[in-house]
Image (cartoon, helix red, strand yellow):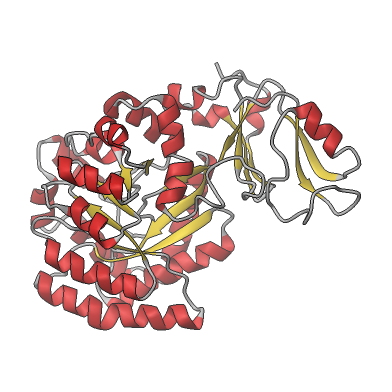
């Protein structure tokens, strides 16, 4: 991880031994003097001296809900006073409060908010982010949210994996069965039409499989229908109650399941056998005072463990370095395990590990330059990333430069 010497980026056409110069992919990884000799005849837009610093893969946030209006700061006090997630939800707060405000917001308002949130994630080192819909619960608003995500895909430098999460809650006035039928008969056919026309690029389908929300059978029906139109299965499961979501996901060939605070031992084994990633969200367990996901048991059983911030009005965290810190302290992961979970494993959970998540020749040139000779400082310094992340680079281009790092010690 520790690269001493000059790290050369963004080669321009010229006497260059690498093929396809300027395509944003990594051309060489290794000792600085070897790379200098290999590219001695090349010209570059920029050369960054990384002496005494570290070069890391760009971080991957495998689970976020970043498109919404109406924060829930007032509910934080309720949670601190002892109200549970489901008590707030059943009283008309939680997801329903945000749905009400998101339905009223214009597409431009949501786009501006999303862009600002993605930029904050970027400054904290995330270069690929999963973005969900799910605060509409009706076809019109869900499509509005997905269009906002689509706009961000082309206007923001950060990479995006788009998720349809229309089954995030049961809309008021409907039963779970009625909501399931609406999603299968109306939402997903429209999504298929927009995908085929190229108007929308949706990657994943998500369902909140939970007691009092969507039961196992409704979840199965929605996920199978989404899979039929080419969406990866990547859903919420076993968070507040044991639902056998992990077993269902393994059976259906899910790419990933998130939360898993209440996963069964059998579910863990099934996920390991199915190569189904576990996207663990230490921010949620921390903020809701839930029991921590069994990261150690999952790792010992061979589950691919990834991390996500779960950024949303209920878990307001943009920072994957802070997520990694919480994973180490509260879920007993090592720093190496946490870094892998926030890079290559998170990329796997999004079906992107062939192009993202590690520094390998041919992969997309997404990386961080850390103002420290030890990469572990990114996790060790809780909330310290603003003084540590010197550069964020996407596709070989510097898209964020923290000039304060040049004049201050990271220690």
Q: Residue at x 72, y 56 (%)?
A: 23
**In the image, is 121 to the left or to the right of 408?**
left
Position in image of residue 353 (x %, y %): 50, 50
**Residue at the top extreme, as displayed:** 411
Q: Residue at x 16, y 40 (%)?
A: 265
Give the camera-side residue of 268 and 187. 268
Give the camera-side residue of 191 and 353. 353
Q: Residue at x 83, y 44 (%)?
A: 44
Q: Quadrant of residue 282?
A: top left
Q: Residue at x 12, y 77 (%)?
A: 178
Position in image of residue 135 (x %, y %): 28, 63
Give the camera-side residue of 366 and 80. 366
Tag count in the figure? Answer: 0
Is 151 situated above or below 357? below
Position in image of residue 107 (x %, y %): 42, 70
Position in image of residue 22 (x %, y %): 76, 54
**Residue at the front extreme, as displayed:** 273
Is 267 situated above or below 203? above
**In the image, is 34 to the left or to the right of 305?**
right
Residue 170 shows up from this direction:
no
**In the image, is 59 to the left or to the right of 67?**
right
Q: Quadrant of the N terminus?
A: top right
**In the image, is 284 to the left or to the right of 31?**
left
Q: Quadrant of the C terminus?
A: top right
Residue 205 shows up from this direction:
yes
Is 373 situated above or below 358? above
């Amino acid at each position: 991880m520790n690269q001493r010497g000059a790290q050369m980026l963004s080669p321009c056409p010229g006497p260059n031994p690498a093929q396809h110069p300027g395509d944003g992919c990594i051309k060489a990884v290794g000792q600085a003097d070897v790379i200098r000799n290999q590219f001695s005849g090349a010209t570059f837009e920029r050369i960054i001296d990384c002496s005494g610093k570290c070069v890391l893969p760009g971080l991957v946030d495998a689970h976020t809900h970043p498109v919404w209006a109406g924060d829930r700061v007032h509910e934080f006090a309720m949670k601190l006073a002892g109200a549970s997630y489901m008590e707030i939800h059943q009283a008309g707060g939680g997801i329903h409060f945000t749905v009400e405000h998101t339905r009223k917001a214009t597409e431009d308002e949501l786009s501006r908010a999303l862009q600002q949130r993605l930029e904050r994630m970027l400054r904290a080192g995330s270069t690929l982010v999963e973005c969900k819909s799910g605060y509409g619960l009706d076809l019109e608003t869900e499509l509005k949210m997905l269009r906002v995500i689509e706009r961000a895909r082309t206007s923001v430098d950060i990479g995006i994996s788009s998720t349809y999460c229309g089954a995030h809650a049961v809309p008021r006035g409907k039963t779970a069965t009625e909501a399931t039928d609406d999603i299968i008969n109306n939402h997903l056919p429209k999504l298929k039409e927009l995908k085929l026309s190229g108007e929308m690029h949706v990657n994943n389908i998500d369902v909140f499989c939970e007691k009092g929300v969507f039961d196992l059978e409704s979840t199965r029906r929605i996920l199978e229908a989404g899979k039929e139109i080419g969406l990866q299965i990547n859903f919420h499961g076993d968070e507040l109650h044991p639902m056998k979501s992990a077993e269902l996901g393994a059976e259906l060939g899910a790419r990933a399941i998130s939360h898993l605070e209440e996963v069964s031992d059998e579910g863990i084994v099934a996920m390991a056998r199915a190569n189904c990633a576990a996207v663990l969200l230490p921010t949620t367990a921390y903020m809701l005072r839930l029991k921590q996901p069994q990261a150690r048991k999952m790792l010992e059983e061979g589950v691919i463990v990834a991390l996500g911030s779960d950024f949303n009005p209920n878990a307001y965290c943009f920072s994957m370095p802070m997520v990694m810190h919480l994973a180490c302290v509260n879920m007993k992961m090592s720093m190496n395990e946490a870094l892998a979970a926030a890079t290559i494993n998170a990329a796997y959970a999004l079906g992107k590990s062939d192009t993202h998540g590690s520094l390998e020749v041919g992969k997309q040139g997404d990386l961080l330059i850390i103002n420290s000779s030890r990469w572990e400082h990114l996790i060790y310094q809780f909330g310290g990333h603003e003084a540590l992340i010197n550069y964020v680079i996407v596709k070989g281009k510097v898209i964020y430069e923290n000039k304060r790092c040049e004049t201050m010690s990271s220690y």
